[in-house]
Amino acid sequence: METVSSREVYANAWMKVREDSIRRPDGSRGIYGVIDKPDYALVIPVAGDRLHLVEQYRYPLGLRRWEFPMGTAPDRLEVDAAELAARELREETGLRAGKLTDLGTLDVASGMSSQRGRVFLATELTVGEHERELEEQDMRTAWFTRAQFERMIADGEVTDAQSLAAYARLLLHERTS
């Protein structure tokens, strides 16, 4: 597929939306709407058999959701993934990781977004004060056993696709380590 032209249709501090005119291999033309967001880091804090989650209100869904700490750098900046992971963990939970292990990459919604994420396992944790952004002021955090977490998935309390995929990455990492 070849991009013939591209135009930005919207931008703010978190994302850009563009519309690309494309030419397919058979010569036919079309358009693609693309959401460009910077890459994010997702962190799975683990202490023994427990996982640390955050719960926050997700405006587009109109719901509070439990998920792993994750986020992007402000103003669409690209930041080193491990540095971003440490920052997001500290910001959202107050935890500091003595060790961050890269578990791999996730694509958010490859049919409409360029955003990708890196998943990190955070261990050797110490507790500190959180440094939440204004949008995160109602965020809650809690520890859950793996059995509780898996029950929350089964019961529909955890539905965040990135958190579910990250947990699969963690399970595969543990099987091969």
Image: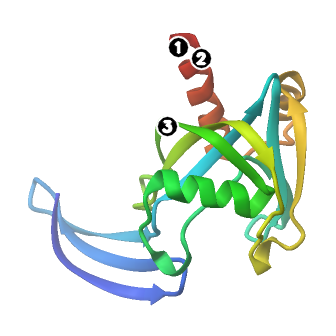
* Residue 70 can be seen, yes or no: no
Q: Looking at the image, do the residues carrying marks 1 and 2 touch, with CB atoms under 8 Å apart?
A: yes
At 47% from the left and 76% from the top, the residue drawn is: 76
Q: As shown in the figure, which amino acid type bears the numbered disc 1?
A: Ser
Colour scheme used in the picture?
rainbow
Task: Tell me how far mark 1 sits from mark 2, CA to CA.
Answer: 5 Å
Q: Which residue is mark 3?
A: 102
Amino acid tagged 2: Glu
Q: Which residue is mark 2?
A: 174
Most foreground residue, 43 or 29: 43
- In the visual, does 84 lie left or right of 96? left
- Is any atom of residue 133 visible in this view? yes
Q: Residue at x 46, y 60 (%)?
A: 39
Residue at image mark 1: 177
> Label 3 sits on what residue type?
Asp
Which quarter of the figure has residue 90?
bottom right
Looking at the image, is 126 positioned above or below residue 75? above
CA distance separating discs 3 and 1: 13 Å
User: How far from the left and from the top, in percent, is residue 7?
Assistant: 29, 85
Around disc 1, counting alpha carbons within 10 Å, would you say few (fewer than 14), some (14 to 19), or many (20 or more)? few
Crowdedness of circle 2 by 10 Å Cα count: few (<14), some, many (20+)? few
